[in-house]
Image: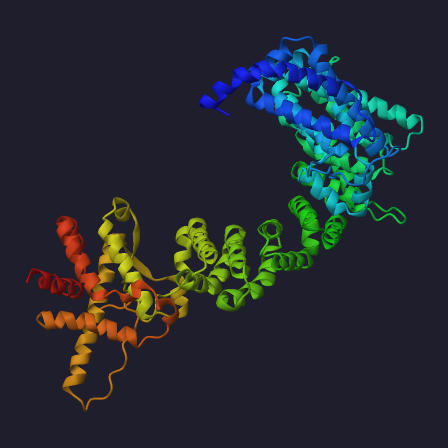
Amino acid sequence: MSGVHKTETTPIMFRMLKPWMETFSSILLDPVPSEDRDDWSMRKKVLKCLNQFIQIFPTITEIHFAKSEFAVYLLPLWETFISTLEVYECSAIEGVEYYDDDPYASSFDGVEDSLESLVNQLFELLVTATGSPRFVKVIMNKFNLYGLVYYTIGFLQMTDKQVESWLQDANKYVAEEDNNTYSCRVSGALLLEDLISNCGTEGIKAVIESVITRRNESQQAKDTGSRGWWKLREAALYALAALASEKLLLDDIEVSGSTVGDMLRKILIEDMAAGFHDYPFLCARLFLSVARFSFMMNNQVRDDFVRAAVETVAVKTVGMDVPPLVKFGACRALSQLLPDATTGCVQQDLLLSLIDLLKNASDGTMHLVLATLQAAVAAGHEATASIEPNLSSIMLNMWDSHVCDPFISIDALKVLEAIIKVTGCTRSLFFIVFPYIEPILNSPQIERDGLVAGSLDLVTMLIKNAPVEVVKALFQVSFDPVVIIVLQSTDYRKMKNATQCLATLVSVWKQDMLSWSGEIQGAYQIKVTTTALALLLLTRHVELGNINVKGHLIKSDTGITTRSKAKKLPDQWTVVPLPTKILAILADTLLEIQEQVDGDNEEDSDSNCEEVESEDNDFLSSSAKSALHVRPTYEYLDAMAKAFNEDQEDDFEDELFSGGDPLNEINLANILFESLQKFLEGDKPCFEHLFQSLTKPQQEAIELVLRRWAV
């Protein structure tokens, strides 16, 4: 609400708010009954109204809270908060009183009136209040901040329904806990995070003190034989997660003579030493807490936790059955601790156990196990090398079966990427991957959705991480198919991934890749390459002159060159600047086109001559041996352009590349004519300097086309 509407409404609300607050106080003051849904529903509506008042009319609402006695308005809210926890503990957590199985039960008007919905509404109101600069001061000054945190931890305990459900399906436990599925636990945890964020040091102290108090209470409950003592201990560990966001302050704030960081480390070490193997949720929560606070541990403590987590995941003791949810918790700890752990902690048993966990993992837990596997592979090179063929095959199959799932497929790719970095595994992995992706890239039109784009991601990963000999072999079989996908595919993801693959190839291997493709052959390849060279020359970039390349072969005077001589005295080449070499190549191309025209003219003039042997298509590597003897005319130069195009029509080896490509429609002869003319006009001194370094036939070929433009 804003503007005129809010201006007109505020005075009215100011007059009405006091009687409403008195009515609300009378409703909230009495303790919450254990089975009265109508009462729960009424309280929930009151809490919703208060929430709206704080959001829309914070100023006038603050007046009634901040400037009044605690007993007038805040005491009823506090009484509802505490009495709701008492009912919630008895019914939902301990299960000793009536508790409706349906947390979303609704009244006749469709409004949820379950106990859980009331708890969530309470937390929603408190989160709104702590998020307001006005009301967070009210909470700190009027409320008992320590008491608020203390009672909130009570709401973080698992309900009997959650325990039953999560024991049956560990995947559900991981999914709901990781994704913060809407529940009282999650709502309470959000409130603690907001209290720490908005109350600063006081909020941190309140959390750590309340956690210690709750741990002591759980120990007392255990000593007295309480069945659910572990729930409060687990809730205390769960509450510690709220401190992780303030990691820079934990070693600076002191509570009872110790820093918060020291107290945290002590809590985790003590609980890990206690074992709690008979309480799977407590063990799982302990590992999750260790993962969250891994940044606070020294090497010795970190290695101790790593060993405990490894033993939990890779346990092989007969008669000892570790529940999957505990293993998943240990996986979370390993994924965070292994990158900084001491080498040698990862053995083959751990990798095999993680592979076994994958077999029964859902999408949510699969992500967790794959992240752990990636960390284990990176930390255990020797163990990885011992089972690499089996591990690589499993990861490739998992990637294939989840290629349409961007999260799982990327996780599997990350594991493969970790494997390829292990000494001795690169070639083996390549020989597993290569036979799989080659037919996919060569026949992309017949593959299922996502497989081609995913294969391109796989190729990109190999290009980034494999050694040069592997990438070179990959280049020989995948470069042409990838280029074809770029030219012909209409699928955005395929085009994007193929383009990214080519860009990665260029950015990682740079000029090295220029020597991998061999000679340029075929009319289409020559046309594309020559056009690119002409455009490059026209840039006249200063850096081009700083690059030296091979010029002419220096003839030897030692007579016939044998193999032994070639080994002792390899070929010697002149060194020339790159612009000189480019201009020479363009001139050679003109010579080849001219010779083709001359050959066609001779064939037309003498029909009885033997069929002229076809010209070599490698325009770039040939050199002219004969001088120009035909005076340039328009007809002659047009024939040169026509001759090249006709020759290309008979060249089918590049059909796949040239199809549908705009470059295939260009006239190479015209491109050369125009480029040379523009170069001459744009920088005549540079052109004349380069021109002097050409051979006589090359100079005459260029003069021929330039005279055409001059006429």
| Residue 244, quarter of the rendered image | top right
In this orientation, does residue 135 appear?
yes
| Direction left: furthest residue | 711
Quick one: 711 or 80, which is closer to the camera? 80
Q: Is residue 642 left or right of residue 496?
A: left
- Residue 40 position (above or below residue 145): below
Question: Which residue corresponds to the image point at 85% horizontal and 30% vertical from the top-left?
Answer: 90
Residue sitting nearer the eye, 112 or 353: 112
Can residue 627 be seen by looking at this rendering?
no
> Where residue 101 sits in the image (x, y, percent)?
81, 40
- Residue at horizontal 24 percent and vertical 57 percent from the top: 534
Q: What is the number of callouts on the image?
A: 0
Find the residue positioned furthest to the right: 224
Q: Is residue 629 left or right of residue 386?
A: left
Please state the horizontal and vertical placement of residue 551, each as a whole percent of the image. Answer: 27, 58
Q: Quadrant of the C terminus?
A: bottom left
x%, y% of residue 546? 28, 46
Give the colour scheme of this rendering. Answer: rainbow
* Vertical order, 152 against 93 (above or below): above
Q: x and y percent of residue 274 in the render?
A: 85, 31
